[in-house]
Image (cartoon, rainbow, N blue to C red):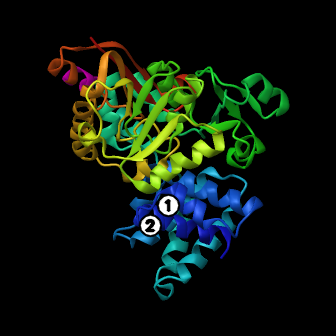
Amino acid sequence: MNAREKAFDLLCEIILKKKYSNLALRHGMNDYSGLDRSLIVSIVYGTMQNYLYVRYLWEHFVSKKLPDDMAVLMDMSIYQLVFLDKLPDYAVVSEAVDIASKKYNGRYKRLINALLRRFLREERRSVDGSSLEKLSIMTSHPLWLVKMWEHQYGLEIARKICENDQKVPLQACRVNTLITDRKTLMKDNGHFTSGRLSPDGLIYDGEALAQTKEYEEGKITIQDEASQCVAYYLNPKPHERILDVCAAPGTKSTHIAQLMHDEGEIIACDIHKHRVELIENSLKRLHISCVHPMVSDGTKAQEVFEHESFDRILLDAPCSGYGVLKRKNDIKVHMQSSDMDEIIPLQQTLLESVSPLLKKGGRLVYSTCTLNKKENEKQIESFLKKHDDFSCEKMQTIFPYEYESDGFFMAALVKK
């Protein structure tokens, strides 16, 4: 099948069958290369990134609801007509009609053709409503999320987050300081430039980071700069014993190991065996030996480990992921306000489970890749009210627009 038809199939898998976009693209692109591959990626990610806006531009044309897959076809076609200037309009319409012809015995091909031609013929629909409603539609963020950010952080920050989520994320990575350093990498490969946030961060402007020789040789690992700050918050020292509770795929565990000069013991846990295997693969590629992966449920940590047996603990908690919408558009498409209802109690349970394992004077870092005070500041406040033997040394929210990074929250708790 051609590139647009493949993009349509992938979008149906991601939007309608709720498959992860990165996995769908990874497994579905083997037969494509060059311009076709770029077009598929552009259509898939661009349509999801602008899903509310493109739907708003055409849905008023129809009186009856289209089948879900035909609505996806309209979404991706409108996206191309609005955002991909190099593609001729007739080609976009023709391809959409061809795709519709293969569905439902061609029942919807004339309708798809008429809708797209009407869109091209008429003046584009303006976005009406309040400032928050306009922001929601123009940046394709659910209105409830925009309202939550406006309430928690103020309108200006909410606007900056939404607008930054529409940008293409930078390709960020972390230098493996056990093997090399940033200056050497930048000297040897002109595609690398120094990061803005992390001392170990690099920005790459080439094609695919995971296909570089630096990645294959273990000199770098793919990690956003905001995520790299978590290990520095933990501030590990050589020869300490550290627990990483929700460690897979091992990105932060291996960074902690670097800061410890690969001297000490890091227990890296995850509840899923296949994800623990990802940690093991990272350790081999990065030539790290002090990390010990294990399958373990963080909510039952006290059944596995002795009380006050760790110098430091990292709880990079499961979260709603509202800080990584720029990078993970499938979250943006599928998110519901009720998602946090299950996540918040789990975060609380994990904090309660692992905190007794920390030695007196030790440090526990709680982090998330979300922008939501209920999962971040409020969690820490609630925990400290119950545990007067802990104090908060510092906490920080990194907004994505500040450093062109992901959004992240970190809090460093110390056991008195």
For mark 1, what is the residue? 75
Q: Are marks 1 and 2 in contact (CB under 8 Å)?
A: yes
Which portion, as a residue range, is magenta? 377-382
Q: Which mark is residue 245?
A: none
Check the image and name the residue furthest to the left.
Answer: 386
In the image, residue 193 lies at what x, y percent? 74, 27
**Residue ID at (39%, 53%):** 272
In the image, residue 136 lies at what x, y percent? 39, 40
- How crowded is the residue under tag 2: few (<14 C-alpha within 10 Å), some, or many (20+)? some
For mark 2, what is the residue? 71
**Residue ID at (65%, 44%):** 285
- How crowded is the residue under tag 1: few (<14 C-alpha within 10 Å), some, or many (20+)? many
Q: Does any portion of residue 38 appear in the rendered image?
A: yes
Q: Which quadrant of the figure has residue 241?
A: top left
Q: Amino acid at mark 2?
A: Ala
Q: Does any portion of residue 139 appear in the rendered image?
A: no
234 in the magenta segment: no
In this rendering, is residue 168 above or below 21? above
**Secondary structure state at the residue bearing disc 2:** helix
Per the model, the C-alpha gap separating discs 1 and 2 is: 6 Å
In this rendering, is residue 89 above or below 277? below
Quadrant in the picture for the N terminus: bottom right
Quadrant in the picture for the C terminus: top left
**Secondary structure state at the residue bearing disc 1:** helix
**Residue ID at (60%, 72%):** 5
Q: Which quadrant of the figure has residue 366?
A: top left
In the image, residue 224 lies at what x, y percent? 56, 34
Q: Quick check: 364 left or right of 356?
A: right
Q: Which quadrant of the figure has residue 61?
A: bottom left
Q: Amino acid at mark 1?
A: Asp
Check the image and name the residue furthest to the bottom.
Answer: 105
Near-viewer residue (61 or 324): 324
